[in-house]
Amino acid sequence: MRGLAFWFFFTAIIYVIAGMAFGIHMSVVQDFALAPAHAHLNLLGWVTMALFGIYYHLVPKAAQGLLARIHFVVATLALWIFIPGIVFAIRQEGELFAKVGSLLTILSMILFLVIVFLSRDRQDASA
């Protein structure tokens, strides 16, 4: 695995380690109030980023070009803003980051949809 696929997958592993540490911390202190942030970190950070990486590995032409690099940046920023935003919202310290992060998250998925569509095998289009 190399290039953009590698970076999506590598960062996914970093995020799952952070998610595991977060879960262990909640367990040690017996305070699960931030469980939604922990769950979103694991789902978006580990599962979604890893799936992006696997797709880019299986379809290398999808990882070529500026749009795929923009996708990585948007997906990463979304995660970095959304997860603390969930924490702030749970602690009633404001919802702005959660809102901005959620919009960036859906933008990331829309970018991925466009990339998947543009990288499809056009030979199958006639079938």
Image (cartoon, rainbow, N blue to C red):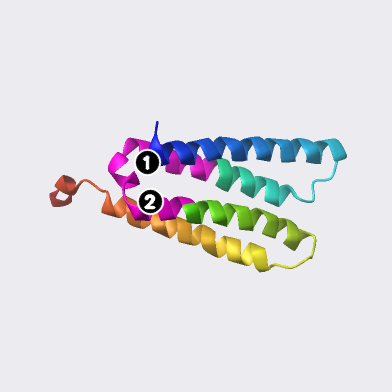
At 63% from the left edge and 49% from the top edge, which residue is drawn? Answer: 40
Q: Which residue type does callout 2 highlight?
A: Ala
Which is nearer the eye, 96 or 121? 96
* Residue holding disc 1: 56
The answer to whether 96 appears left or right of 53 in the picture is right
Q: Relative to 10, is 44 above or below?
A: below
Which stretch did the figure color magenta?
Answer: 47-72
Q: Quadrant of residue 54?
A: top left
Q: Residue 16's x, y, as percent?
A: 61, 37
Nearer the viewer's eye, disc 2 or disc 1?
A: 2
Q: Relative to 38, is 66 above or below?
A: below
Q: Residue 69's x, y, as percent?
A: 41, 51
The answer to whether 103 appears left or right of 60 in the picture is right
Assign the N terminus to one quadrant of the image: top left
51 drawn magenta: yes
Q: Are marks 2 and 1 in contact (CB under 8 Å)?
A: yes
At 80% from the left edge and 41% from the top edge, which residue is drawn? Answer: 26
The answer to whether 122 appears left or right of 47 in the picture is left
At 53% from the left edge and 61% from the top edge, which residue is drawn? Answer: 104
Distance in Å between CA atoms under marks 2 and 1: 9 Å
Which is nearer the eye, 119 or 34? 119
Q: Relative to 99, is 39 above or below?
A: above
Q: Label 2, secondary structure: give it.
A: helix
- Disc marking residue 68: 2
Q: Relative to 97, is 6 above or below?
A: above
Q: Residue 34's x, y, as percent?
A: 76, 50
At 47% from the left edge and 57% from the top edge, which residue is drawn? Answer: 108
30 drawn magenta: no
The answer to whether 69 appears left or right of 36 in the picture is left
